[in-house]
Image: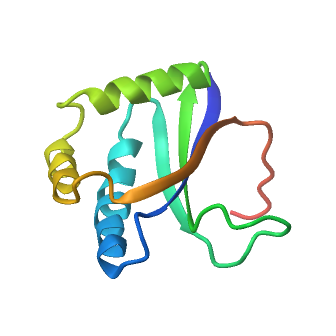
Amino acid sequence: MARFILIGLVEPASDSPEDQQAFDDHYLGQHIYDTALCPNFLSGTVYKLRGGHVGIDIPSEYIAIYEVDAESYEEAERVLNEWQRDPNAWEGRAEHNRAMAETEGTPLKVKGSGWYEFECAYHTRG
């Protein structure tokens, strides 16, 4: 089995305080956790940009990183898509659907996403 990460470059739907709150409540408070419950997923983490990128425009203020074990990224993507379509896949699905209905769609913009396969790691501290 291989190790992958799925990254998502995301941000609130707009700069308004209401959209930031909807993003915080739904995406940070619910969606990341729900998605991390998907079969083969090991974790879901979000980071907020605090310094600029060198040599490029900032693609997104937030990056979501999901760690996944699967035979291939295609299998991981298939499992994720099937799981997200299943109305009974996870306990918080009703809350997820309610939040989506309240915001009349998704409370975020996805600027990009992609799968990366593990190559190497160096851990120098606990």
Q: Tell me the quarter of the image containing the C terminus.
A: bottom right
Residue 76 picture location, percent across and down: 51, 26
Depth check: 54 or 80 in front? 54
Question: Which quadrant of the figure has residue 29?
Answer: bottom left
Question: Which quadrant of the figure has residue 54?
Answer: bottom right
Identify which residue is drawn at 45% across, 56% down: 109
Residue 89 picture location, percent across and down: 24, 31
Q: Which residue lies furthest to the right in this view?
A: 55
Residue 91 picture location, percent across and down: 18, 42
Question: Compared with residue 107, is residue 70 higher up or lower down, i.e. above or below?
Answer: above
Identify which residue is drawn at 42% across, 70% down: 14
**Residue 8 shows in the view:** no
Identify which residue is drawn at 37% across, 73% down: 20
Specify whether 67 is left or right of 34: right
Question: Which quadrant of the figure has residue 62?
Answer: bottom right
Depth check: 100 or 104 in front? 104
